[in-house]
Structures are given as structure tokens and as C-alpha cells.
Amino acid sequence: MFDSLLIANRGEIAARVIRTARRLGLRTIAVYSDADAGARHVRLADEAVRLGPAAARESYLAIDRVLEAARKTGAQAIHPGYGFLSENAEFAAACSAGGLAFVGPPASAIAAMGSKRAAKEAMAAAGVPVLPGYHGAAQDLDTLEAEARRVGFPLIVKPSGGGGGKGMRIVQAAAELPEALAGARRLAESAFADPSLLIERYLPAPRHVEVQILCDAHGTALHLGTRDCSVQRRHQKLLEEAPAPDLEPEVRERLHAAALTVARSVGYVNAGTVEFLYADGEFFFMEMNTRLQVEHCVTEEVYGVDLVEWQLRIAAGDRLTLAQRDLLPRGHAIEARVCAEDPAQGFAPSAGRLARLDWPAHDARVRVDAGFETADLVPTHYDSLLGKVVGRGADREAARRALVDALGAVRVVGIATNVDWLRRAAASRAFAAGGVTTRFVAEYGEALVAPEPASDEELALAALAWVESHAPPAARTSPWSAHDAFRLGLPAEQRLRLAADGREAEVAIEAVAASATNTSGLRRWRARVGAAACCEIEWGADGKVDVDGRRTRLEWHRDGTALHLWRGARHWRATVVDPREVDPSASAHEGELVARLPGTVVAVEVAEGQSVAAGAILLVLEAMKMEHAVVAPRAGTVRRLHYAKGERVPEGAVLVELGE
């Protein structure tokens, strides 16, 4: 075994690899861009080397800079993580040429699977089922359009290179085809430097099922069962589980055999995953990820195997000492990807400083792989994954309940996240029933993002928390610092107008016997919402709260003008409405469309003076490794375009002016 390891990645996966490497006694070396200078993976490693500016092309994707960092620090091996250079055959070859152990498959295997188009042809020849489609070398638009019509609609267009669902376009009718081909090719060129595309028959409601494999360089190839990753948005996975539920034993065995056939056909070595689409008892090869996957954790929890450890041992030349007959699943595990994104805004990415990030506390049923902590900066340049929460149990239902409880304990302030959405999804009847398809978000997404307006009781608690958040510590011991609105001869009442989760109301709170405490040590208040009496609240400094005699525990965190509150898993956000303050967005002229995040313009679909219909795509921004279409909110005329293709856009910048 080598004694030093450079992790050519960032965030959660870098922290994950460091954890196992440190347990094995290896010296760990992190790399970072300017955007990640203070990142968690940098703090965890024994050493860290700056690669360059924030742009991935000048840092994490710069092969020469990564290799120079390895040379400078005396690293003997490089783990690429996932994303970035993890499936780059040139990088794997360069590591080997430089005398470094590449913790992954040989460059030849990466190259064989790097083109989905070539891989599909090879797998069909090997007898692995593939979807009907076009995987040919001719890539001119006329050929692609003709082949698409031959395949029939609906169909899906995919970039041949890369992975992670990026650039995929579903085409329901011929009229949508030109834009879909253009969009997929555009992203394929920018993200993977490979403009080639493939076309396949689209299954409207399949399941996404995959098989984890592990192969050494001595001819042993093993599978570690199945995973189901069907809960996705924009082909990006959100909930994953192992084993895949509701599969007939015969289908499961055929999946295992097909995955091993795929691995052996390309001389695969190290950990990898073979992905399939499954519907009506049949499955079809999608692609092979020649790397560790984000969702490897659920397989580790079910099989009791540290896949990163075996990656390192195989890269060092060790033989697999595991036997297929001994690799039996025990229990169930379900993983949720906690991402910096806003489900209510179409899963638009979010970025900024984490004012608070609490992961679930110690729980034998829960595993957390975190890439960020409180006070960390979530940059706009990379993907939105903050960390992963895994629930495990003796069966699927126990694992699901553990996950729901764990997600209810996550606390995030400073940016938007999908935590509440994930908890609702995992708690839903549809997910609990099992066997969900890739249509899950389309079918249940609106219900999962529907706002839950704050109740009168929650408004009253928010008003009290707001008052407490302004009170100095001395307020609890000194009458001169009290914030209970004491007045001679009048009720000690104060009023606030609150907006909370889609509801706005005036709340009055009155201190009752403010100069004394009751036997429980809690201060007593009477609350009124609007003209109606609401409740009596006994409030303690340590989060203990009695509401009309019911004991509960309240957590709150003030972030500027916003207040986040949690009571168990219930989370609501409140702000005080001050008529003296003006919403900055109100100063924007009508018809101005602004950027919600910094990004790069990758396409401009209209020209100045052009008339557009409501919903028409005006331009496309790329932010946090995803494309986001800016659409016309109403019919009108494009009065002015402020940015051209390729230009960088700051947050809040006016992109388009739309006239009548």
C-alpha cells in the first residue's frame, strides 16, 4: 500500500475519501481553487495545494496543475472522486505515466465507456439489452433528425460523453427536436468537450436501477447488489436506496450477471457502477460510471464493505479477499442528497455563506457524509451538493423512518436547500409504497413544494422569538434591560406585523406578570393574532416552551431580517414587515428580468425587437453546473439584451428588458 494520497476533488467526496485514507494511515493531500480556500476538505487534509482560480477549467480540471501538486507534495496515488477528472481517460493515463497509482480503472476502460454511443454498440454486441435508438458516428443534424424520426416519439437526446444526466433532453414531438438537439449539443461541447449525441426511445415511467461492481487486477469480479435511484429532478438523483425494492429474484440475478458482463468486456478494474432502465420486467443498459458514485454509501451500509478502502487496496495491487457467496445484503439503506437549491423555484441553485448548518446528531440509524459546515461558503462555480444523509434499518420501512427523522433534524440558515422537500418526499405515501419511477417528481412535485402557511400559534412563537432575538443576556436578570414592553398602568404589550410562509398578520404579545416567574421558571406571555386571542405561552431561555399547557421545544435562528424556527421537524421562516423599508426588487423597472445567481450565458434565443409569447425561452444561463432557461413571463417585445453568449453575469444583473 502507498503511504500518501492526493484527492483530486472537493466537497463531500473529498472529505469522504480523507476519512477512509486517514483510518488506513495514509497522508492526505487536498487540492483547492480560490473559491474553496477555506473549504472543509482543505481543513481536513494533512496538506493542501492551491490549483488556481475558481473556474474549474483552471483548477480542478487542469490536469497539469493536479499532477504538479502531486509531484510537489510527494503523493504516490491520486483518487479522483466523482465528477471533474474522475472519468477522464487522459488523466488516468497521465497519472500512470507519471508513476502515480490512479485510484480507478485503467484508461482503456474509461475510454471504452466514456462515449455512451460507442458503449451502447459494444454492449449490444456483448448481448446486454440496450434501448432501440441511434448510436452511430454520423453526427450532422440532418442525420440526427432523420434517425430521430425513425426511432419515433417520445425519445431522449443525450450527450455521448460525460454523465450525471447532464444535457439530456426529452422530445415529445417533432417540433421540439431542433431545439433539443441544439441544447444537448451546446452542453455536450461546454461540459464534456465532445459534441456527439445519441438518440434513444424514451420510456415514460421507468425505474433507474443500477449494480455496484468491484474488480481487482487479478481476474476477480464481484457485484454488491442493486440500488434504485429513480427519484430524480432533471436527471439528477435525489433519493437512492439499496437494495432496489420490488424486483423479482430472477430479474435481480439477470441484472447482476449483465453488470459483470459489462465489466469483463472492457477489462474493468476497481469500483464501478452499471446503470439500467427497468420497466415491466425488462431492463436496458444505460451507461457505466467508471468511478465511485455519490450513492455508494447505501451499498456500504447494506453490505458492510468500505468501497473506498477497496478502491485504494485494488489500486495498490491487492487481491479481493471477498467472496461472492459471502456478499449478502443485510437490511436496507436510503440516502438523501442535501443540495443548495430551491425546490419552490424549480430547484434553482442557491449559493452563499452558511450562517448555520447542523447535521443530525449521533444516531445509530443514521450516517452523514458532509462536505460543508456552519460558516462555510457555498460557491456558485460547482455542483450544489452539501452532503448526504443516510437512514438504515432492518427493512425498508425502518430505513425510511430513520431517514425522515434524520432530515427533520437538519438545520440550515443562509441559503435555500431541498431538506424540507426531501423529508416530505421520503415521508410521502407514494415513496413509502416503494417501486417509484422516474416520474415521481413530475407526479408529486407540486404537492411536495406546496407552502404550509404558518398557524396562529407559529406566528405567536415567531413574534416572541423575534423579541428574544433582540434582547441582551442581561434582559433576563435586569429590569432595566427587559424587552417585555413594560409600561406603568398599561398592558405590557407590543405588536409586530409578521410574514411567515405565505401568510401575513399582525401579532400582539403581552407579558403577564413580567416581574416574576412561575414555578417552572418560564416567563409567561399572552398572544393575539389579529383581533382574536391565540394562546398563552410560557417561554424559557433554553428553548423550553409551554403553549396552553403543552410542553414543546423550540429552536430559532435570526439571520438578518429573517427568523428561522423549528419545532421538531416543522420549519418555518418569518420576517417582520416594516413599512419604512422598501423591497429592493421594487426598484426594478417593469419588464426587467434579473439573474438570481451569478452564471454564464450559454445561449441567446432571441434578438432585440423580436416579439415573443409568454413562456418563450429568451436566453439560457449556466450556474452551478446546470442550465437554467430565462423565459418570458408574458407576451411582449424584447426591448434590450444586456448580455451576449459567453459573457459572465453577476447576481442581480438585468438580463433582458421586455416591453409591451
Image (cartoon, grey):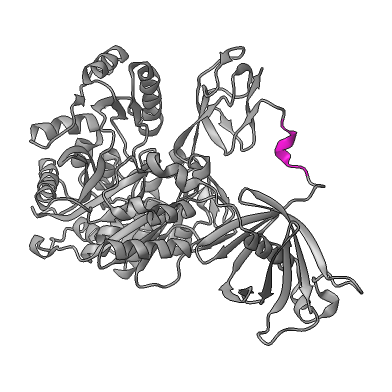
Residue 46 seen in render:
no
Q: Quadrant of residue 283?
A: top left
Residue closer to the observer: 120 or 217: 120
Magenta span: 582-588
Residue 70 in the figure: left or right of residue 152: right
Among all residues in the image, which is located at the extreme right? 488
The residue shown at (68%, 80%) is: 522
Residue 3 seen in render:
yes
In the depicted structure, whether residue 502 falls above or below residue 129: below
Among all residues in the image, which is located at the extreme bottom? 519
Residue closer to the observer: 226 or 326: 226
Does the stretch in magenta take in 571? no
Q: Quadrant of residue 189?
A: top left
Quarter in which the N terminus is drawn: bottom left
Q: Quadrant of residue 656?
A: top right
Residue 85 in the figure: left or right of residue 111: right
Quarter in which the C terminus is drawn: top right
Does the stretch in magenta take in 584? yes
Residue 117 in the figure: left or right of residue 294: left
Residue 468: percent from the left, percent from the top? 72, 68
